[in-house]
Image: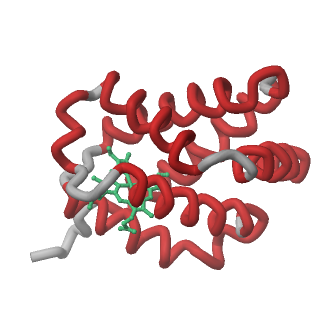
Amino acid sequence: MTHHQINLIRSSWAKVNEMDVVAVGNLFYNKIFEMAPAARQMFKGSIAEQSRKVFSMLNYVISKLDKLEDIISEVEKLAKRHAGYGVKEEHYTVVGNALLWTLEKGLGEYWNEELKQAWTDCYSTLATAMINAAQPTANAA
Ligand code: HEM
């Protein structure tokens, strides 16, 4: 990701952060469950609580986008917890599409191709790191 893209992500995320986390979260999770109904059963807690957790993690990751190497071990732990929830590689595509859709809806006229590309690159960097970290290691028992 370029410096310019990181700035685009941060300024657009700042706008999302001014919105109601539960309302944005509902949009996002409803979209995920519309695209992948079977994923619903993996979520045991309330969607409001889940939305707060994911927003807070995204806040953290976005604050570190210019030095992702500093948080790689936390991202790996997050990925391994996700494998434990039953999350599979293909779910990352669904969640990425739902995220882009939610951002487009939430940001409205502010949304454009450049922003879409920046968020696509951002999500794919994070998702690729998580997918790789979730793979069992060659010498795992
Ligand atoms: C960039 C990608 C993602 C991020 C940043 C993220 C973030 C989080 C966070 C912070 C939590 C709270 C629990 C914890 O920290 O372990 C969580 C839980 C969870 N996430 Fe994700 N997640 C991502 C992708 C996904 C994907 C692709 C799925 C698949 C549908 C998924 C499904 C879940 C489930 C099932 C839980 C546990 C819910 C529960 O216990 O009720 N996540 N996620």
Looking at the image, residue 95 sits to the left or right of residue 12; the answer is left
Q: Residue at x 21, y 56 (%)?
A: 44
Q: Residue at x 42, y 53 (%)?
A: 48
The answer to whether residue 78 is visible is: yes
The percent coordinates of residue 115 (x first, y second) are 78, 32
**Which residue is at the far left?**
141
* Above or below, 4 relative to 120: below
Q: Residue at x 36, y 49 (%)?
A: 47
The answer to whether residue 1 is visible is: no
Closest to the observer, 139 or 130: 130
Closest to the observer, 20 or 56: 20
Q: Quadrant of the C terminus?
A: bottom left
The percent coordinates of residue 28 (x first, y second) are 48, 36
To which quarter of the image does residue 59 belong?
bottom right
Location of ligand 1 given as a quarter of the image: bottom left
The percent coordinates of residue 114 (x first, y second) are 82, 28
Looking at the image, residue 84 sits to the left or right of residue 56; the answer is left
Looking at the image, residue 139 sits to the left or right of residue 34; the answer is left
* Above or below, 105 relative to 135: above
To which quarter of the image does residue 58 belong?
bottom right
* Above or below, 110 relative to 9: above
The percent coordinates of residue 96 (x first, y second) are 50, 36
Q: Residue at x 19, y 52 (%)?
A: 86
Looking at the image, residue 124 sits to the left or right of residue 63; the answer is left
Give the tally of numbered discs: 0
- Colouring scheme, one of rainbow, by chain, secondary structure, one colour: secondary structure
